[in-house]
Amino acid sequence: MDREAELQELEEKREAVRSKMEEYHQRLALAYDKHIRPRVFLEGDLVLKSVDTVMRKMSLPKWAPKWESPYIVSEVHPNGYCILLDSDYGTTTGPINFKYVKKYYA
């Protein structure tokens, strides 16, 4: 009988730790979400694209621009990336993460 009580107590401790971990993960997610800026792009929006060297985390010369000329958003995917259309040349880019794109205000 004593062994069953120990097993029951052990299971209760595990459940208490599990609930504390869930609370911790919820607090962590809330703290993370406070600093996240949601980015919403629609097809047809004018945007600036980050220069390739910035996307590859390479160093830039001191006075080099970090953003490239305005592009038109041609496709938006719910996973957080878009396809851009270069209006000057009529070409499309590969998929680009939202963090490398920002709205262009003319």
Image (cartoon, grey):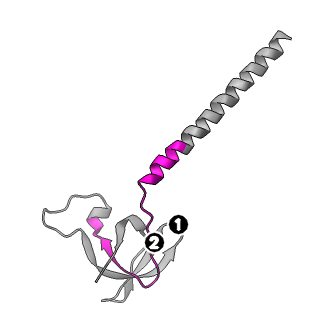
**Drawn side of residue 8 relative to residue 50, left or right:** right
**Drawn side of residue 97 relative to residue 27, left or right:** left
In the picture of the structure, the residue carrying the numbered disc 2 is: 40
Residue at the spot 54% in from the left edge and 70% down from the top edge:
78
How far apart marks 2 and 1 lie (CA) works out to 12 Å
Disc 1 is placed on an element classified as loop
Neighbor class of circle 2 (other Cα within 10 Å; few <14, some 14-19, many 20+) is few
Amino acid type, label 1:
Asn
In the picture of the structure, the residue carrying the numbered disc 1 is: 79
Residue at the spot 46% in from the left edge and 49% down from the top edge:
32
Residue 8 spot, x, y in % from top left: 78, 21
The answer to whether marks 2 and 1 mark residues whose Cβ atoms lie closer than 8 Å is no
Q: Is residue 30 above or below residue 104?
A: above
Q: Nearer the viewer, residue 6 or 34?
A: 34
Q: Nearer the viewer, residue 16 or 61?
A: 16
Q: Quadrant of residue 52?
A: bottom left
Dot 2 or dot 1: first in sequence order is 2
Residue at the spot 46% in from the left edge and 82% down from the top edge:
43
What are the residue bounds of the magenta stretch?
27-53
Residue at the spot 52% in from the left edge and 43% down from the top edge:
27
Disc 2 is placed on an element classified as loop
Q: Quadrant of the N terminus?
A: top right
Residue 74 spot, x, y in % from top left: 45, 83
Farthest residue, direction top: 2
Residue 28 spot, x, y in % from top left: 50, 43
Amino acid type, label 2:
Val
Mark nearest the camera among 2 and 1 is: 2
Reply yes or no: does residue 43 show up in magenta: yes
Neighbor class of circle 1 (other Cα within 10 Å; few <14, some 14-19, many 20+) is few
